[in-house]
């Protein structure tokens, strides 16, 4: 199965400003997070895949086809930009129906699906109100609704949690994950917040200053780089010294010792060291890294 | 994914009681037919018409279109009522020149100008201002489809404004004539003229309004620009023509007695009179409209000059819009 989106050596310049530099990546089925600070090139990459802008150099493909003629692909793509994009004097029902029509759906189907999708995103009662009266959370939901109303294969969501409070963010992420899982819609979600990506996405692409920093499975990052937590009631210093003697690096964090990426032999050595020193072990457990730990570590 | 679960009857008790049905109304995957560019274009066009008329919007959005409809139809309905009134008292309307079609277009010009200025920009400016264009840019549309569909939507409404009152007038003239068939035979040419002038006038106003709307995200600026364009070109044309016409020529023209003194513009062959073509209401109504209806233009400039000026304005304004929308989004 070819990648839904693929970029090969994409460079995008705005005058002398480099927005993307020699980026090569694939977006496959499922949920992919596009992580990066503001200005890292996330929106540029999305608008490029959408055919709104052209790359300065490099090739890109959408659903396996050359991305430079996107009209056909647009029938199966949904997009919600980072900024506000809803006409304030129109109701969500009217607007979502219209957008479904512009995506090519027949009239009656467009109307039915608009109602269904607005209920799905939690805009049931409010759907006849003008969208200018909506809160930020409701606007984000309406933006999601117009992006999925035509039953696309792939949806690009640019900062879908922007402007939301923590509770609102969680609800929005849960809605996105549910939409993707239940209906098999692949998603590319950009965010500058690690937590958003970690909670929703299976795969991750990290951009930094217009270049590709990392790409891969979220689970691979978090499980491959496990930390072993050893919590002691007493004798922590002795164990730390014993481990140092045996060549195992352990950092101390309060009453715990942390050992990174312990192999099977390491585990045996650690067990022996605890027995030898007679320390009171309270707890021994693996702790998966959060993505932020990983990138903080790679940055340092 | 189940789309609908029908036939799950629940209210079975009672013979005449309505039976309930349970529906699963959630979001579901779509495997049905998907139209392409044509469907998308039609949808933008239809939404444009709804937007101009304020359909699907609040009551306030319907106020202006409603008001202008009344304004543009009002005089036609008045004339028809007068004719009906005369006929009902056994009078004869044959000899009464109530209102000629080309004169009615002079009136339509003013109303349609105001309508195009006030309502027209709503088709383009707000979408750009509210960044809705980004959402159209990811639909199956080519870059210019959006702007052209909007242009056609306003043209459709503008043509209704130009032609519907004229059609009512024509019908009333036919029906109130002592010999309807005779009137129809004598004035058959009027029908094609009504259509031709209606189309040209509608295209003229549509292009102006859409060009202005494509240049600004503020509706008010676009509205003011449309009105200002007509007034400023008229002022340049009027004053320029006046200044360039020498007293001698004016006198010569007056003596030639082609037209009454009030309408003296410039003698034939004088470069100055081309300036008057910039007075666009005159060029449109006095030139193009009267020429099409076969009545004499009231200024001594060959009518194709008027037609050329109107064509240049339409093409230029349309070109501005096309230039501004050559790229959708981005």
Image (cartoon, rainbow, N blue to C red):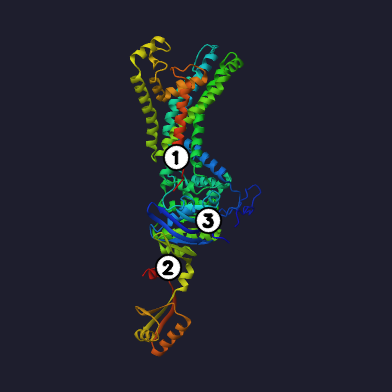
Q: Is residue B326 above or below residue A149?
A: above
Q: Classify mark 1: helix, strand or loop.
A: helix
Q: Tell whether label 3 touches label 1 (CB within 8 Å).
A: no
Task: Give the spatial CA distance, label 2 vs label 1.
Answer: 47 Å
Q: Classify mark 3: helix, strand or loop.
A: strand
Neighbours of disc 3 within 10 Å: few (<14), some (14-19), many (20+): many
Task: Give the spatial CA distance, label 2 vs label 3.
Answer: 29 Å
Q: Does residue B64 appear in the picture of this structure?
A: no
Q: Where residue B1 appears, x then y in whole percent?
A: 59, 57
Residue at position x 51%, y 21% in the image: B292
Q: Which residue is mark 1?
A: B323
Question: Looking at the image, which is closer to me, B326 or B223?
Answer: B326
> Label for residue A291?
2
Using the image, name the chain to which the residue with label 2 belongs: A
Q: Which residue is mark 3?
A: A61
Earlier residue among tags 2 and 3? 3
Residue at position x 46%, y 25% in the image: B108
Task: Give the spatial CA distance, label 1 vs label 3.
Answer: 28 Å
Instruction: Report whether A238 appears left or right of B10.
Output: left
Q: Where residue B125 appears, x then y in whole percent?
A: 42, 40
Neighbours of disc 2 within 10 Å: few (<14), some (14-19), many (20+): some
Instruction: Report whether A300 appears left or right of B197.
Output: left
Q: Does residue A198 appear in the picture of this structure?
A: yes
Q: Where residue B313 appears, x then y in whole percent?
A: 44, 30
Q: Where residue A96 appears, x then y in whole percent?
A: 50, 47
Instruction: Report whether A300 appears left or right of A49.
Output: left
Neighbours of disc 1 within 10 Å: few (<14), some (14-19), many (20+): few
> Label for residue A57?
none
């Amino acid at each position: 199965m070819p990648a839904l989106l693929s970029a090969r050596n994409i460079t995008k310049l705005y005058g002398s400003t480099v927005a993307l530099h020699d980026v090569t990546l694939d977006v496959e089925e499922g949920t992919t997070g596009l992580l990066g600070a503001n200005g890292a090139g996330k929106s540029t990459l999305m608008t490029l895949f959408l055919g709104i802008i052209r790359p300065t150099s490099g090739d890109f493909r959408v659903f396996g086809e050359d991305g430079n003629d996107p009209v056909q692909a647009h029938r199966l793509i949904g997009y919600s930009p980072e900024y506000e994009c809803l006409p304030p004097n129109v109701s969500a029902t009217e607007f979502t129906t219209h957008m479904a029509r512009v995506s090519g759906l027949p009239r009656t189907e467009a109307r039915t699906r608009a109602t269904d999708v607005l209920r799905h995103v939690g805009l049931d009662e409010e759907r006849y109100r003008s969208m200018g009266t909506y809160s930020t959370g409701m606007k984000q939901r309406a933006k999601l609704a117009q992006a999925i109303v035509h039953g696309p294969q792939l949806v690009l969501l640019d900062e879908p949690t922007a402007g939301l409070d923590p509770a609102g963010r969680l609800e929005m992420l849960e809605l996105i994950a549910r939409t993707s899982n239940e209906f098999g819609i692949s998603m590319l979600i950009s965010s500058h917040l690690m937590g958003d990506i970690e909670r929703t996405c299976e795969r991750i692409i990290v951009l930094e200053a217009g270049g590709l920093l990392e790409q891969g499975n979220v689970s691979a990052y978090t499980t491959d780089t496990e930390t072993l937590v050893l919590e002691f009631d007493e004798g922590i210093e002795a164990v730390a010294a014993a481990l140092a003697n045996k060549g195992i690096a352990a950092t101390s964090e309060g009453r715990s010792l942390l050992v990174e990426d312990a192999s099977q032999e390491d585990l045996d050595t650690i067990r022996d060291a605890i027995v030898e020193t007679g320390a009171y072990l309270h707890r021994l457990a693996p702790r998966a890294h959060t993505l932020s730990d990983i990138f903080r570590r790679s940055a340092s | 994914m189940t789309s609908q679960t029908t036939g799950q009857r629940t209210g079975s008790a009672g013979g005449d009681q309505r039976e309930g049905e349970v529906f699963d109304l959630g979001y579901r995957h779509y495997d049905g037919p998907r139209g392409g560019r044509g469907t998308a274009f039609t949808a933008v066009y239809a939404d444009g018409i709804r937007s101009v008329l304020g359909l699907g919007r609040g009551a306030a959005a319907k106020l202006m279109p409603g008001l202008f409809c009344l304004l543009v139809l009002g005089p036609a309905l008045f004339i028809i009522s007068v004719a009906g009134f005369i006929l009902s008292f056994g009078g004869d309307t044959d000899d009464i020149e109530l209102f000629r079609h080309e004169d009615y277009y002079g009136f339509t010009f003013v109303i349609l100008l105001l309508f195009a200025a006030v309502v027209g920009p709503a088709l383009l400016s707000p979408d750009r201002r509210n960044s809705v264009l980004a959402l159209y840019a990811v639909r199956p549309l080519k870059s210019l489809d959006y702007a052209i569909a909007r242009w056609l939507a306003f043209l459709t409404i503008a043509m209704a404004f130009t032609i519907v009152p004229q059609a009512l007038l024509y019908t009333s003239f036919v029906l109130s004539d002592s010999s309807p068939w005779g009137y129809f035979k004598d004035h058959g040419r009027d029908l094609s003229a009504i259509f031709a002038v209606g189309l040209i006038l509608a295209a003229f106003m549509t292009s102006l309004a859409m060009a202005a709307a494509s240049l600004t995200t503020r509706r008010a600026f676009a509205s003011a620009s449309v009105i200002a364009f007509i007034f400023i070109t008229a002022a340049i044309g009027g004053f320029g023509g006046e200044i360039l016409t020498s007293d001698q020529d004016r006198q010569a023209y007056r003596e030639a007695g082609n037209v009454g003194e009030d309408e003296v513009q410039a003698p034939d062959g004088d470069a100055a009179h081309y300036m008057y073509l910039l007075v666009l209401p005159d060029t449109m109504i006095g030139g193009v409209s009267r020429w099409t209806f076969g009545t004499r233009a009231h200024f001594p400039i060959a009518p194709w000059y008027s037609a050329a000026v109107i064509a240049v304005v339409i093409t230029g304004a349309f070109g501005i819009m096309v230039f501004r929308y050559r790229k959708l989004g981005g």
